[in-house]
Image: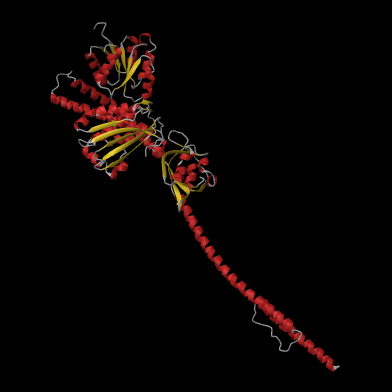
Amino acid sequence: MNSDTKHILIIEDDSLLRGVLRDELERENFQVSEAKDGKVGLEMATSNSYDLILLDIVMPNKDGLSVLRQFRKHDHASKVPVILLSNLNDPEKVAEAMLDDYVHDYLVKSDWSLADVTKKVKTVLGVL
Amino acid sequence: MAKKTSELDQYKAKVSQRLEELTEVLAHVSVGDFSKTLKIPKKEDEFTDTYVGVQLLLDVIRDNLSQLQQVNTALSENVRSVEATNRTVEQEKIIDEAILDSIGEGLIVTDTDVRVTIVNHQATLMLGLTAKELVGKNLFKQVRAFDMNGQPVPDELRPATLALKKKRKVTHTGLYFATKRVKELSVAITASPIIVGQSVIGVVSVFRDVTQEREIDRAKTEVVSFTSHQLRTPLSVINWYTEVILGNHLGEVTDRQREYLEVILFTTRRMIELVNTFLSVSRIQLGTLVMDVKPINLQEVIESVHVELAQPIDQKRITFTADFTDDLPTITGDPKLIRVVFQNLINNAVKYTPNKGYVSVATSLIRPEDKLPVEEGVLVVIEDTGYGIPKKQHSKIFTKLFRAENAQQIDTEGAGLGLYMVKSIVNYAGGDVWFKSRLGKGTTFFVALPFVPAVRGTKPA
């Protein structure tokens, strides 16, 4: 992996969804790391540097909004671009998260195709 | 000397006799016996005048007494018959009151000034007010009403007022009552005008406590909501995995495999749409639908729906025309929801019109004098030369999961939610939707949208 390879972190509790997203993004030559819940996601976001974080909003134990708030307090995660993964189960939380300056957009998992997701990722990373 | 004594004695005897006769007759009369009359002596003497006078008097008294007795008898009879009638009326009144009080719903009768004239037991129980506190008082001041959004309902819009004005029955299923003792009572109410001859003399309002019904409704809606949420993630999984295979990332997919996989993708997308629909509908019913209000260019929305339907329109060789008024003002509303409305209506028009038919969409400005359900806004008319809707099914067209018989035959897969969705959204935004249709001739749908959405609290009827 050269330094040009963008490193993406996926924080999503559904392993199947996480898996297919990871495969797709790796096919697009991104480096992908996974976190299976908010707690692990927070640890990873604060200890490593990522170019983009795909963050699921509705997760058991620690939801995406609180993970976002917490890793924003850490220097190297304070400005990392974030795309929210949602199924619009909690529109209020999505709306609140969108107020963050570096949250670029939210995508509705059931409404977006994988191709759309990839396009969005590439746009945010400036590689489109 | 003897002669003088005998004259005096004779006179004394005559006076005694006359007085005895008088006394006797008077004695009889005093006990009501007028059978004895005074015998007027043939030979006129000092008593004749008195006798005639007394007898005349007695005759008059006797006649008067007799009349009085007749009147008395007649009066007694009257009194007896009135008493009998009163008892019947009393009994009927008791029965009527018993009927009123055994009605399980609250009943209030008001006059043309909205003053309470009759209130039944159930109403007093539900409202926490005594009959005394209600009868004779202005109903609206004793019982306040709020809509589903917690907004007070103005007097002019209360069912009793509307029934008086419109001279017809008015039903409202989404109200809350509040009185000085009852903070909040969920009610469904029907107000009917009381018409005597040609005039309305009052209103009968019947209402029932629907607290439990609403709770059940709410619970049902939450179950739907919860289930819909839970379904979305697995559906996304199916979608994305299928997409990966179709992208040939797991090896080259044969044509046949592609066909089948595309069916999976298509069907999953339909399920997602269904889930989204259920969710929106349940949110509307719960009143929790958050409308993302923005200016909407109706022309753009309709044209984009047209583009989406290009394929079936082409395939069926349908002539599609769209006629937009010049300077069509923008309305504000939730673009996604408004789009769903036109997507449904125009899709239906295309779907249920045979080959070489016509579908037209036209917009126009609504002004107050048009007397439409919306005072000012935009009217969109979607007309087709399609199969039409059977008259018997007109009243059920907007109900959930209803599909007209002929529609069911043409498209076996429709869920019957589209029009329910359309009506829910349009009503929620403060507008209205209605249609006319003739079997075999075609259908025309009318959508009236206000310039600014006025969110209504009542559930669509």
Question: B156 and B142: which one is in front?
Answer: B156
Question: A22 and B200: which one is in front?
Answer: B200
**B161 vs A78: above or below:** below
Q: Residue at x 18, y 26 (%)?
A: B261
**A100 vs B318: above or below:** above
| Left or right position of B66 against B411 | right
Instruction: Give the x, y percent position of residue B316.
Output: 20, 33
Q: Residue at x 15, y 25 (%)?
A: B257
**Residue B377 falls in which quadrant of the image?**
top left
Evaluate whether residue B41 shows in this view: yes
Q: Residue at x 38, y 24 (%)?
A: A92
**Residue A48 falls in which quadrant of the image?**
top left
Quadrant the C terminus of chain B occupies: top left
Instruction: Give the x, y percent position of residue A100.
Output: 38, 16
Quadrant the N terminus of chain B occupies: bottom right
| Left or right position of B70 against A89 | right
Instruction: Give the x, y percent position of residue B2.
Output: 84, 94
